[in-house]
């Protein structure tokens, strides 16, 4: 799942599909080939996503929408997934030959009767696809109105595809997670919950303060070398052109303050460890006692890198050399759905 490299190695050409030359190109091609060995195809029972085109001021925007072939009557929850820097909607949904942990949402959508949508980002200053998140000090983001795009996607899904406006959930990886945080800050009153994986709020932010209380799930690895757990420059080898972030715990604290979730957590627990060979460990901390009310969850992956935790969608050993270790203690999409499913837009404590 190349979106896992998001803010780092792929943005500098590792594993790209074109422009590979010499030894560097051979290594990149080899890494891509090995990464495909860990790919997981979409569940056979899930209908193929349909393609939507939204007309926007910056031009047509492409969205993949997966609709379950059976679901209870009435409006359906909508989950929107945002890929990482250099990724795509197709990669996110497991339609390309790379491991895609967020493609687990297709199986969840089919089982639970959800709409699952994945838009494509636009090319930024480095000609890689991405999102216009809050970082003022990055040179690689596109300049499109991606907040407007997500709102237009919600409008389309509600008007024409039976989405429930009270049950809209947003989840993103890396640059996509930062974009999810931006949307939550500026238009969170349209959401019932948001999840950001390997992502953090900007240090030098061009976004306004958080508009409305909202439930937030943050997932991150303490050994993430691309979006640092404790904050700092984004990207490999301390690049400066991708901006800086405040870190996962500081991000959670900002949202706890906005949600008035002070004091001790309602839950703090170690996630059961599945594989003795996996050196990572997962710790879950939740503020807010009611699953149907406001909650903040921090899922810390000790020793984890810049990659989504997954049991079924494992990245290759070669890919792990670039992004760090992948936790096998949980399925990140299932974790997010457990967090989302009882929440509705506008609920409080």
Image (cartoon, helix red, strand yellow):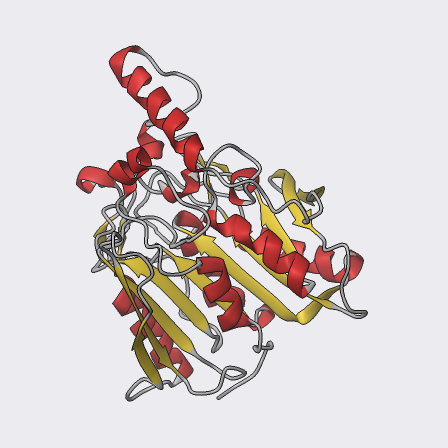
Tell me if 77 is positioned left or right of 279 in this view.
right
Q: Can you name the residue that lies furthest to the front here?
A: 276
Give x and y (percent) for residue 338.
Answer: 51, 71
Of residues 321 and 175, the one nearer the viewer is 321
How many numbered callouts? 0
Of residues 290 and 213, the one nearer the viewer is 290
Residue at (43%, 32%) from the top-left corner?
Answer: 37
Residue at (63%, 55%) from the top-left corner?
Answer: 116
Quadrant for the N terminus in the image: top left
Tell me if 161 is positioned left or right of 142 in this view.
right
Of residues 225 and 122, the one nearer the viewer is 225
Residue at (37%, 28%) from the top-left corner?
Answer: 34
Asked if 56 appears above or below 127 in the picture, the reply is below
Residue at (31%, 56%) from the top-left corner?
Answer: 275
Q: Is residue 201 visible?
A: no
Q: Which image quarter: residue 203?
A: bottom left
Q: Which image quarter: residue 74?
A: bottom right
């Amino acid at each position: 799942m190349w979106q896992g490299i998001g803010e780092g190695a792929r943005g500098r050409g590792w594993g790209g599909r074109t422009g590979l030359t010499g030894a560097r190109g051979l290594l990149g091609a080899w890494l891509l080939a090995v990464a495909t060995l860990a790919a997981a195809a979409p569940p056979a029972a899930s209908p193929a996503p349909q393609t939507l085109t939204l007309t926007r001021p910056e031009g047509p925007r492409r969205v993949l929408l997966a609709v379950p072939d059976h679901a209870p009557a009435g409006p359906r929850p909508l989950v929107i997934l945002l890929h990482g820097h250099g990724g795509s909607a197709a990669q996110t949904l497991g339609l390309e030959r790379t491991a895609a942990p967020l493609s687990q949402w297709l199986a969840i959508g089919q089982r639970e009767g959800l709409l699952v949508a994945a838009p494509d980002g636009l090319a930024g200053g480095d000609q890689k696809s991405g999102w216009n998140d809050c970082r003022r000090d990055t040179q690689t983001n596109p300049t499109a109105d991606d907040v407007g795009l997500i709102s237009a996607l919600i409008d389309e899904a509600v008007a024409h595809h039976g989405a429930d406006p009270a049950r809209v959930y947003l989840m993103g990886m890396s640059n996509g997670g930062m974009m999810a945080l931006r949307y939550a800050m500026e238009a969170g009153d349209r959401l019932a919950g948001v999840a950001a994986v390997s992502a953090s709020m900007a240090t030098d932010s061009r976004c306004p303060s958080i508009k409305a209380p909202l439930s937030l799930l943050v997932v991150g690895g303490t050994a993430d070398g691309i979006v640092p757990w404790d904050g700092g420059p984004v990207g490999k080898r301390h690049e400066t052109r991708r901006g800086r972030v405040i870190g996962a715990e500081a991000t959670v604290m900002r949202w706890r303050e906005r949600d008035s979730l002070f004091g001790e957590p309602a839950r703090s627990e170690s996630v059961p460890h599945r594989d003795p060979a996996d050196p990572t460990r997962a710790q879950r901390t939740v503020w807010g006692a009611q699953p149907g009310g406001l909650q903040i969850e921090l899922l810390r992956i000790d020793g984890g890198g810049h990659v989504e935790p997954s049991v079924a969608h494992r990245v290759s050993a070669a890919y792990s050399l670039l992004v760090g270790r992948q936790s096998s203690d949980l399925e990140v999409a299932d974790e997010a759905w457990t967090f989302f499913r009882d929440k509705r837009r506008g609920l409080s404590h």
